[in-house]
């Protein structure tokens, strides 16, 4: 079966005047998500942004604006601002962090990501989910949630509805993990540090990892963030592989750029930017104040992007594949939690 399906050519650019209403809506959504996080610190701002986007798309007096005048700008936020946020995400990871994990943990993370990605993608295809949903859901579960979905969807030129559905599912399951995994620590037999590694290897979004691991203390939180950032580092090769698959399919179909498609770069520019930020962080030249500023900018950009993606979710249309999507989400959750738990036990045992 083919990993990717071709999408219709998109040639219309979004002009600044057309994008302005949607960008204003995205800014208001970010402010609301930030307020929710302040009132309820256990809810990550990025999770709140997705949920608020979905809510805005279905409020009687708001949905007309969200699906009308604001749609170009919200789509722009979901794509372009997502790229900028992913670039800044690279400043969270340094090469020393990867070396500090040790080869056993690095191998464990590689195994978890590979098993989760291939298992979820295969199940999604077997369940008959449409479009790129199997690919995107597999990406979100195996790498870093909505950010990874945004990166891979950009390389695959995925339909916005597939992206919105995948983001909604991954965000929901990651949010549930915040409540469920701490309850399982006692029966898991893991100490705090090992529990943190389990969280980092199995929970999707970085904010959700922090919210889950902090319940077991600072040792768990530190290990969780390190393991999670190792998963984030695998975003670059995954996006490059997807871009290569798209290029191969177009060559096989003899689709020329002159026919209306641009040539797909092997490494998209924003992924190169992500890698450049990892290298820059590794030099140690950036002061902590600059890193803090970049972290704030990254959170705001990703929150705006996720609000835009959330606003593209159409709940009534999900009834056609809702049961299958939910079933895939549950199966993928079991896969990533089970494989990562086994990996942590092997590494620490």
Image (cartoon, helix red, strand yellow):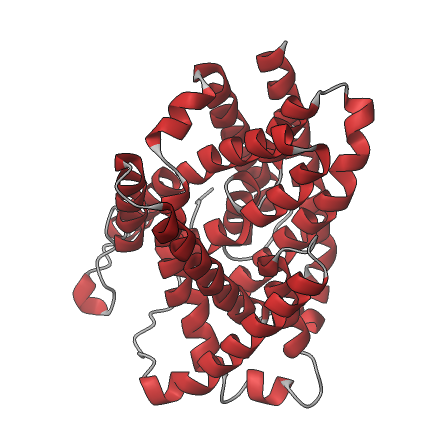
Residue 316 in the image: state x and y as whole percent: 71, 72
Q: Nearer the viewer, residue 292 or 220?
A: 292
Residue 89 visible: yes
Q: Nearer the viewer, residue 32 or 3?
A: 32
Q: Is residue 158 left or right of residue 212?
A: left
* Count of numbered circles in the view: 0
Q: Residue furthest left?
A: 258
Residue depicted at 72% across the width and 60% down the height: 40
Coordinates of residue 75 in the picture (x, y in percent) = 45, 73
The C terminus: image quadrant: top right
Say if 330 sits above or below 196 in the image: below
Above-or-below relation of 347 to 292: above
Residue 158 in view in this figure: no
Closer to us: 284 or 231 = 284
Q: Residue furthest top?
A: 349
In the rendering, at what x and y percent does residue 298 appear?
43, 57
Residue beneath the point at 38% across and 51% down: 289
Q: Residue at x 50, y 76 (%)?
A: 27
When asked about the image quadrant of residue 2, the answer is top left
Q: Residue at x 42, y 61 (%)?
A: 297
In the rendered image, residue 4, in percent from the top left (x then y), is placed at 42, 50
Residue 317, quarter of picture: bottom right
């Amino acid at each position: 079966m083919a990993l990717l399906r071709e999408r219709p050519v998109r040639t219309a650019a979004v002009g600044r005047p057309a994008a302005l209403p949607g960008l204003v809506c995205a800014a208001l959504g970010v402010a609301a998500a930030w307020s929710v996080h302040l009132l309820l610190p256990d809810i990550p701002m990025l999770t709140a942004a997705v949920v608020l986007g979905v809510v805005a798309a279905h409020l009687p007096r708001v949905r007309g604006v969200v699906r009308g005048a604001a749609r170009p700008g919200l789509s722009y936020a979901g794509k372009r601002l997502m790229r900028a946020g992913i670039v800044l995400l690279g400043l969270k990871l340094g090469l020393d962090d990867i070396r500090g994990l040790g080869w056993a943990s690095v191998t464990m993370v590689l195994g978890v990501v590979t098993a989760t990605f291939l298992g979820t993608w295969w199940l999604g295809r077997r369940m008959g989910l449409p479009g790129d949903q199997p690919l995107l859901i597999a990406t979100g579960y195996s790498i870093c949630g909505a950010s990874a979905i945004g990166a891979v969807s950009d390389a695959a030129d995925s339909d916005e509805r597939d992206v919105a559905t995948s983001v909604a599912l991954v965000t929901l399951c990651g949010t549930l993990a915040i409540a469920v995994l701490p309850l399982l620590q006692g029966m898991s037999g893991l100490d705090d540090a090992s529990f943190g590694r389990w969280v980092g290897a199995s929970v999707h979004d970085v904010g959700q990892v922090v919210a889950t691991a902090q319940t077991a203390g600072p040792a768990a939180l530190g290990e969780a963030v390190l393991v999670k950032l190792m998963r984030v580092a695998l975003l670059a090769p995954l996006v490059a592989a997807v871009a290569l698959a798209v290029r191969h399919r177009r060559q096989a179909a003899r689709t020329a750029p002159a026919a209306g498609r641009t040539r797909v770069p092997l490494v998209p520019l924003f992924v190169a930017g992500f890698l450049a930020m990892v290298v820059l962080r590794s030099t140690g030249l950036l002061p902590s104040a600059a890193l803090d500023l970049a972290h704030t900018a990254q959170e705001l950009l990703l929150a705006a992007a996720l609000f835009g993606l959330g606003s593209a979710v159409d709940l009534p249309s999900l009834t056609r594949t809702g049961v299958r999507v939910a079933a895939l989400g549950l199966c993928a959750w079991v896969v990533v939690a089970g494989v990562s738990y086994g990996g942590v036990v092997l590494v620490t045992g």
